[in-house]
Image: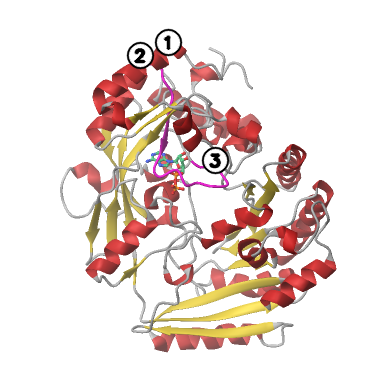
Amino acid sequence: MKRTVIDLQGLQLALRDFTALLGKDRVFTAEEDKDAYSDHFAGANQAAEHRPSAAIAPDTVEEVREIVRIANRHGTPLWPISRGKNFGYGGSAPVLAGSVVLDLSRMKKIEIDERNGTVVVEPGVSFFDLYDFIQAKGLPLILSVPGNSWGSVAGNALDRGVGYTPYGDHASRICGLEVVLPDGDLVRTGMGAIGSGPTWNLYKPGYGPSWDTMFCQSNFGIVTKLGLWLMAEPESVLGLNIDVDKPEDLGWLIDTLAPLRRNGILQQSPSIGNWLRAAATLTTREQWAKPGEKLGSSAIAAIRQKFGIGWWAVALRFYGPLEITEATMRVVERAFEGKPVQKLGRTRWVKGDPPEGSPVTGVPLTYPLANANWFGGRGGHLGFSPVLPVDGDAALKLFKRNYELHDQYGLDYHPSFAIGERSMNNVNQLLFDRDNPAFVANADKLLRQLVKEAAAQGYAEYRAHISYMDLIADTFDFNDHALRRLNQKVKDALDPRGVIAPGKSGIWPANRREHKA
Ligand code: ADP
């Protein structure tokens, strides 16, 4: 079979069977439905290349199992999404055009274990849903939320999304999954395999091999329940907001934070962002420059002046009893003594105060999405997110080159550097005007060049947009792509008919592997 061909006759039969199972109200085949499940932030051509043929919305795990059996019977590719808000990486759209989107957003059960600080969520539970649930019950727990809280708690963790509290590495807090396998079998991982008992969501390894991570960024199964650890509400959250004046300050800023993060003084992953972070969410580009005109030093100075910000800014937060957070504050301030900080602000929240209203205290939000409005209503964006060592010189080198490349292709530079314990996620948002085909083409060229040059320096991405999953998988090339061979062997063993998310993370099933697009 040609890689991109969908068996249309099989699809019709599958839709007939899906309708018999779910009723026609939960099978969506109209053109406006296909629009709704397409990538809203990509250029027109890219969106067309990933347009689904339908979407279906089960309510129960038994329906999911039956859907998978139907898909196997007719060779119909399914693209599972939880809520499909993976904006910048494709939203709800599939890699393979013509796939049927399996929309799990109606499955919204929440089971919380208050004492142990764990929750089991179904895929449809959004960050807002879980926040409201915790608030309504008055539980002393806080969430780690990503930049877009419309998204699914489960879907975000499965795609290795990140947040800003000490629990911000969402995938690492997963403990126990329930998964429908590509043949319709149902498995619970870890201690959940006992079938009953209290430890499913408490002990991650289980007995024998551990499988939770196998279902992250993969197409090996459909997750129908996800166990997650939640952070206890701290007694206090103290913090420092630090701004620095010059682009080169990025180097020492990273090197100052690195040891604090590595040795656990800093427990969240602080994200260093540039002046565009504020400008793109709070204003539109035409307020600062004419169309096509570069944002030069005077525009940058005007933006910085309006928002009272540095070239770079970072928010540090310390969580715990006041005795500890106050001591941490002193240690961190000492690390910044003698450094050319432009501005340093202190924040303080103590239990009982109104919430700081920001993701660092686990309050869900959507306003970072406003940056898609940078070019007005038709703003698009793509993510480019290489993983780097936590090293100021390495970051500066990449920053300088990537800034030049953005200039060369006519895009504004919108990077952030999130400092983890041992690595940094350099998340870049490529913002463009979807109405302008030349601009869209330039964003595509820029992204490809960024990936290529990063790979030449030994860096690869932690996450990919659906249009670039193969490109990025290609950069993982040790021993002639041994990792790809391993992924393919697993895929073939679990999913011989290739029905679950063909092409996810560059993993193609055997029947679509022959002719590489
Ligand atoms: P969110 O709404 O949090 O942004 P999505 O539903 O868009 O999350 O999921 C992001 C990606 O993760 C999807 O494109 C899909 O590849 C994968 N994914 C999401 N939910 C599941 C699931 N329940 N089972 C398997 N893979 C999933």
Main secondary structure of the magenta stretch = loop
Q: Residue at x 66, y 56 (%)?
A: 374
**Residue 478 point in image, percent of width and height:** 64, 36
Residues rendered magenta in the picture: 72-91
Say whether residue 181 is visible: no
The answer to whether the residue bearing label 3 lies less than 8 angstroms from the nearest atom of ligand 1 is yes
The answer to whether 102 is drawn above or below residue 398 in the figure is above
Q: How far apart are the alpha carbons under marks 3 and 2?
A: 27 Å
Asked whether the beta carbons under mark 3 and mark 2 sit within 8 Å of each other, the answer is no
- SS of the residue under disc 2: helix
The residue that disc 3 covers is: 90
* Left-right relation of 472 to 439: left
**Residue 151 point in image, percent of width and height:** 43, 51
Asked whether the beta carbons under mark 1 and mark 2 sit within 8 Å of each other, the answer is yes
The answer to whether 231 is drawn above or below residue 124 in the figure is below
- SS of the residue under disc 1: helix
Q: Nearer the viewer, residue 423 or 81?
A: 81
Q: Amino acid at mark 1?
A: Gln
Q: How far apart are the alpha carbons under marks 1 and 2?
A: 6 Å
Say whether residue 260 is visible: yes
Query: Few, some or many C-alpha atoms within 10 Å of disc 3 (few <14, some 14-19, many ≥20)?
Result: many
Q: Earlier in the sequence, mark 3 or mark 1?
A: 1
Asked which quadrant contains residue 483, the reply is top right
* Left-right relation of 363 to 279: left
Asked whether the beta carbons under mark 3 and mark 1 sit within 8 Å of each other, the answer is no
Q: Residue at x 57, y 61 (%)?
A: 422
The answer to whether the residue bearing label 1 lies less than 8 angstroms from the nearest atom of ligand 1 is no
The residue that disc 1 covers is: 9
Mark number, residue 13: 2
Q: Amino acid at mark 2?
A: Leu
Q: Amino acid at mark 3?
A: Gly
The number of numbered badges drawn on the structure is: 3
